[in-house]
Image: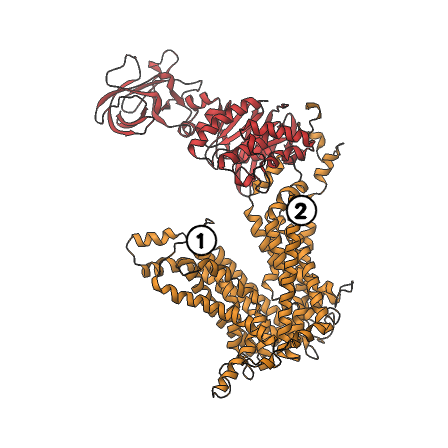
Chain colours: A red, B orange
Amino acid sequence: MSVSQASIDVRDLVVRYGNVVAVRGVTFTVGAGEHLTLLGPSGCGKTTTLRAIAGLERPTSGEIRIGGSVVFSSSPSVNIPAERRGLSMVFQSYAIWPHMSVFDNVAYGLRVRKRPEAEVATRVREALDLVQLGDFGTRSASKLSGGQQQRVALARAFVFSPSVLLFDEPLSNLDAKLRAEMRVELKVLQRRLDITSVYVTHDLEEALAISDRIIVMRDGVIEQVGTPGDIYDRPRNTFVADFVGSANLIRGRRRPDLEHDGLVVIETPSGALVHGTAGGRPPGAEALMAIRTVRLSLDRTRPAAAVNVWPARIRQRVFQGDFTQYHVDWDGRVLIVRSAAPEPVAEGEEVFVSADPRHCVLLED
Amino acid sequence: MGGSERPPSPPGVRHAPGNPGRSSIWARSWWPGPRLVSLLVGGGAAILVLYPIAYLIQASLSVGDPQARPPEAYGLDNFTDLGRYKHIIGNTLQVAAVATVLAVVVGFVMAWILSRTNVPGRAAFEQLMALPYYVTPLMGALAWAIIASPSSGYVNQLWRVLGGEGHLIDINSSWGIAWVMALFEGSVAFVMIGAVMKSMDPSMEEASQVLGAGRIRTMLKITLPLVLPGVLGAAVYVFAEMLGSFSAALVLGLPARFYVVTTAMYQLVSQYPPRFPTAAAMGVSLFAVMFAMVWIYRRIISSGTYVTITGKAFRPRVMDVGSLRWPFLAICIAYLAVAVILPVLTIVYASFQHLGAVAPRWSNFTLANYATALSLDAVRSALWNSLLLGFATASIGVVLMGFLSWLIYRSRLPGAGAIEYLLMFPQAVPRLVFAFGMMWAWLVFPIPIYGTLWLLLIAYLTVFLPLGLRTISGVILQIDRSLEESAQMCGATWGYRLRTVTMPLLKPGLVAAWLLLFIASVRELGASILLIGPKSKVITPAIVESWFSTSTELTAAMALLQTLAVAVALAIMFAVARRAVQAGGE
């Protein structure tokens, strides 16, 4: 299968419905062959942005280029219809046509392009094999399970070698177990096809698993852009820290006098010192730090580290299977700690909480 | 294959409008300009609806010579004069009120029994509840006139045989008309109230019971308030329909000189000399009142009280009513008996008799009525015209209304809401009133279509716009938009999408709409009766004419022939359609 990659440039994109502004001036670039994910809670404008790229939503202003060519621009006015943009899309609802067979569903894009039937047959078979539905061609599309429909939707989307693949929450209608499986499968398929892709989801794990880069959105604006590792370990502000996994937020006063080795130090109102990383962000006099719940350790004996070791007491323990969640009395407040350690600490026990300064991240606000 | 790959790189700025691209693909994707086509069709349909209304209003304001066209002078005298027709307005309100109360009670009771109790045969009854609607008020009125007219009605014949004086029941009264209409509208109310009952989340009632309220208390405090807006909506809707109803009032009221607004209008137009302006003023007033009712209905339906309707289908909680099942079953059977079985049997029975007599005697049976009906050229041509019109209306209507529904609910055309409002307009206008406007409008139309079948075709297409749109849009709204969008993302142009995705998915809705339009056209009375000409007669007005000028038995035969013709036509359609489907599948 021939591969054509295209880059996407979105500049100052604004989408307004009447008085509601869904997207407020978003600018980003997707490199050729890159897998980008738009992540955010519902109503953040991620799906609208995706649909604007697809051509299914007409933006109010801004510019969208695909492979260097302008497909939408407010001035001069250009709006290439969706069917002429050479993209493809997997829909949240799968949108499998119930009146066609699996084969006809997948063959649709090729037949639109008037490929000879022999070629259609070969390429549809290849595509169905790739999504492990090789024997399902003659099956009526209305008689498929959710997971199978998902695979047909995938095959249909990539079979005609589009230059860009768009995914609109494709896994959100599957049950948790199937979703985890499909996530892996999708990633393998994505790398194998090597097509530029834009993926929309509200599911953190999905975004972390399949993306080269993630854009976190809120209320129609971009909150942070970065690799999955960046987004997870170095959230830019409270919103990202909170949305991307659970984090403890600690507010305090800067103590520049104690800072060394490039670390930032804050002092909480009750006097605890927290050493952390600025990540290039200019710290002010007041500062906020985020520590992921999984990056905190609990020990019965005092760990050897020089900094970021604090005495604490277990207030509550909640067993959750893969991990145990502890509510810890620390510095006059409660910290949440998630620990996968096999030997649980008992409620009421005096312990030491510690954190590597690399995982204590200074936030912008 | 990379070299022959056609559309991988998207078209750039050079293909933008204003700079004619060299490729024909570019031209094709822009040419059928959905916007332009939509605007033309939407505008055309709007003219179809508004043109007659404008003429109706013009006629109602004419105060000079009533025969003069265009009017010599304008004024409101026709409206102020309506005070002279107070008794007619009173009659109309009385019939409508009685019929509405009856119909809503029937609808509510039937809806409750069939959706909430374990009455035997629930599923079958629910299907059968559509039948009264197909019996039509005209058939019902004819049948009940045969059963209960004061002089020759079967019931009254029996009454006198048993030694009674005069008559037991008089169907030629406001009560009689209301009775016939209520039997018909009962199934309408049932559908509306039943839908509300089914869409109510049963957990709301269960919550009440869990908190300790008894069954009666739950019914009064929870069920009733939740269902009330639906019942109210049905009542307003039925009342509005009743105000504009025509055929039963004509058949049952005319012999007793009992007039409602629609029959009075008809009388004013068909008498000599006709009094068009007065009739038009009545029509405009009736239209205004019905418009207000429809508006109120919409307000009720869309008000926040409908929170129970989530669009989610709940499995309604069925109550075990114990031995009460049998009385409930009797109620269901009784309704279907008086609304369907009795009328149909009566007409069949009468159509085979020489002289209407309640006691069957062998010598009284005959096929002569059918022979006469079929030998009359007038009947034959009327029947043929009706079938032809039905076929044309249904076929053109499905294409037109299918396109209009798609336009309104899918194209995101600016102003789609306004177009929808316009197209649903005929719903608020009694067909007789609408036909009056059309008569007036097309008389002066430069192309002479007045008195031809073309006028009837235009009339049918206009008055059945709401019926067709509702049926088709019901299906359109069920089709997820992403089914079309995904075709678009596969590169299909809008024409290709329409052909390969939208139309095939719409097929069931289109077939249903075709059938409904066909049946409705062949049986249309209110619009037809004013628009037929000597050379363009159709069957339903012919049946009414026969009722007033020839024998009851002949009329019964004609009514059955009409029903039979519809059935045969539908059977042929089904056979053809099935063969087409099979041929397509192989």
Distance of mark 1 from mark 2, alpha carbons? Answer: 40 Å
Front residue of this view, candidates B366 and B126: B366
Q: Nearer the viewer, residue B487 or A241?
A: B487
Residue B551 screen position, x and y as percent: 64, 79
* Residue that appears at 62% across and 24% down: A6
Q: Residue at x 64, y 44 (%)?
A: B585
Residue at 50% from the left image edge and 86% from the top image edge: B161
Secondary element at image label 2: helix
Disc 2: CA contacts within 10 A as few (<14), some (14-19) or many (>=20) = few
Nearer to me, A125 or B106: A125
- Asked if residue A19 is positioned above or below residue B294 in the image, the reply reads above
Q: Is residue A84 visible?
A: no
Which amino acid, by three-letter code, is at mark 2?
Answer: Ala
A91 left or right, relative to A247: right
Q: Are the two marked residues, 1 and 2, in contact with CB atoms closer than 8 angstroms?
A: no
| Pointer 1 chain | B
Residue on which the image places disc 1: B199
Residue B538: % across, % down: 69, 68
- Where residue A310 sits, quadrant-wise, is top left
Quadrant for residue A100, please give it: top right
Say which residue label 2 marks: B583
Label 2: chain letter: B
User: Please, what is the three-letter code of the amino acid marked with disc 1?
Assistant: Ser
Q: Dot 1, crowdedness within 10 Å: few (<14), some or many (≥20)?
A: some
**Mark 1 secondary-structure assignment:** loop
> In the figure, residue A301 lies in which quadrant?
top left
